[in-house]
Amino acid sequence: MAYSDKVLDHYNNPRNVGSFDKKDPNVGTGMVGAPECGDVMKLQVKVNPATGIIEDAKFKTFGCGSAIASSSLATEWLRGKTVDEALAIKNTDIVNELSLPPVKIHCSVLAEDAIKAAIDDYKKKSENVGVESKAHA
Amino acid sequence: MKFYDALGLEPKLAIDLDDLKKRFYDRSRQWHPDRFSRSSSEEKQRSEEMTSMLNDAFRTLREPVTRAEYFLRESGLELSKDAPPELLEEVFELNMALEELRGGDESARGQLVLAQERFTGMLADADSGLSRLFASYDGKADAIVLEQIRATLNRRKYVSNLLRDVEKELNVHSAN
């Protein structure tokens, strides 16, 4: 099965590979995986707490080319979006952009799940920070 | 469940392997195509179908994991596609170590050997967990137990894939 040019481009030149300190209160971390292929994907967002805008996003994915391309594309799209805009990213957007074949759709689902998990993690953290600072006040 | 029916067994999760083997051999002899060489073409076809069914049934039922997967499917439960979340962090770290070893960083080897031991232990735990759950479900057909079996199988599959990757990498690099 041939990969599309866009998948190959992301696979050969993945954007934003790396990680942030997951203890940073402004960082949200999403870790997802698929048991049948053993893929595991870590996606992180760094949010500006004042504006709610995602200033940076990083990922590291162990898996096939489509899984790497899906998460690489996701980090590109996440930069500059608000947290709520990020949650509106759908796996079908990724499928269309990368022309993923039906057998690789689960890779885009994994990327969407990773985005949601990262945003969830950030939201939980920022709520906790709020609670703590009130407790200290 | 047709595999159990083919061997004249009640559908149970816990199985006596000697009994299973004996049933398989007896019935395979009974339906062996050689005994039908002078029969009608319908009977010949029936003997071939039964032989092939008995082979599938025996192969599926003799291993606890494939047996339980079959039992779940027949009970309308598919294996989950979600990775066990409690394992993900570890899987990620393990993949990092695999990547380092592939890149020639020998210091990752120790981590992989430890992982190999841990995963082997986890597989053994999953297997003993399964046999406990089998007995429990056979005693009282509780849907919750079937869910627990599914979760155990799911976890087991993930761990065994990881173990395969780790062992493959350790073997590839042991020559160096």
Image (cartoon, coloured by chain):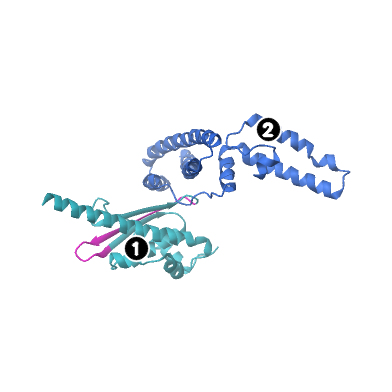
Chain colours: A cyan, B blue
> Measured from the top left, where is residue A79 in percent x and y?
30, 66
Q: Is residue B25 visible?
A: yes
Discs 1 and 2 carry the same chain letter: no
Q: Can you identify the residue that label 2 sits on?
A: B21
Task: Give the residues drawn in magenta, as a range.
Answer: A37-55
Residue furthest right as drawn: B38
Between label 1 and label 2, give the one nearer the viewer: 2
> Measured from the top left, where is residue A95 in percent x and y?
46, 67
> Measured from the top left, where is residue A68 in percent x and y?
42, 59
Going by the numbered disc 2, the residue's amino acid type is Lys
Quarter of the rendering containing residue B111 = top left
Give the residue drawn at x 45%, y 34%.
B121
B149 in relation to A31, above or below: above
In what element is the residue under mark 2? helix
**In front here: B2 or B118?**
B2
Going by the numbered disc 1, the residue's amino acid type is Thr
Q: Can you identify the residue that label 1 sits on?
A: A75
Query: For the image shown, how many numbered marks are present on the structure?
Result: 2
Q: Is residue B35 magenta?
A: no
Q: Is residue A76 visible?
A: no
Q: On what subunit does the disc labeled 1 rest?
A: A
Residue A134 shown left or right of residue B92 in the figure: left
Label 1 to label 2, Cα distance in Å? Answer: 55 Å
- Report the predominant secondary structure element of the magenta stretch: strand
A76 in relation to B173, above or below: below
